[in-house]
Amino acid sequence: MDINYFKEKLEKLNEKSSAQFGEMTPQHMVEHLTLTLKLSSGRIQIPEFEPNEAQLEMKRKLLHTDMEFPKGIKMKGSESGLPPLRFPDLETAKTKLLQAIEEYNTTYWNNTKLKTIHPRFGYLNHMEWELFHHKHFQHHFNQFGIW
């Protein structure tokens, strides 16, 4: 992932940026992207599971077609609303996101065969995570008009 590209995009985001869809605040969105990067680099681990047919079909469509990331999809475990914020402010959250991108890049640079678990799709390899992150970042950056 090109950290400079994402740094430039994040500079356009501030606490007053309003969502064009969804419930997230700018800081919730940034912290959410950080979490998914940590999952993909193995810094946060979830239990192994076998994806069902519907999950495998969604994985195929999302990663291997022009399908856009669906609006209104809920992150697993977020049924009860937005999670508490982890960082004191948006600027700190942005810094943590950029650090997570660096960690992600380093992780896959050092271990090109690594596979880590996605909460809906099961194990993904580096190329699959790249496809996922591209669409996921695009979705959330479009949410706040910074893509």
Image: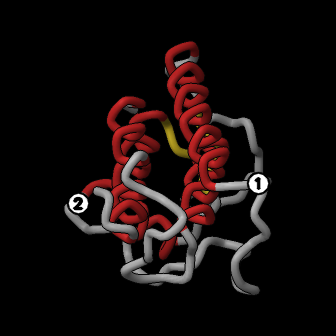
Q: CA distance from mark 2 to mark 1?
A: 38 Å
Query: How many numbered tags mark residues here?
Result: 2
Amino acid at dot 1: Pro
Q: Between 108 and 138, which is closer to the camera in this rendering?
A: 138
Way the structure is coloured: secondary structure
Q: Residue at x 64, y 48 (%)?
A: 93
* Residue situated furthest left in the rendering: 66
Say left or right for 106 vs 10.
right
Give x and y (percent) for residue 16. Answer: 49, 70
Q: Between 50 and 93, which is closer to the camera in this rendering?
A: 93
Circle 1: element type: loop
Amino acid at dot 2: Thr
Q: Residue at x 60, y 47 (%)?
A: 91
Q: Residue at x 46, y 34 (%)?
A: 126
Give x and y (percent) for residue 118. Answer: 60, 53
Say left or right for 41 vs 86.
left
Which residue corresponds to mark 1? Answer: 88
In which quadrant of the rendered image does the C terminus lie? bottom left
Which residue corresponds to mark 2? Answer: 65
Are dots 2 and 1 in contact, CB under 8 Å?
no
Give x and y (percent) for residue 69. Answer: 36, 68
Q: Quadrant of residue 38?
A: top right
Above or below, comparing residue 20 to residue 2 in the picture:
below
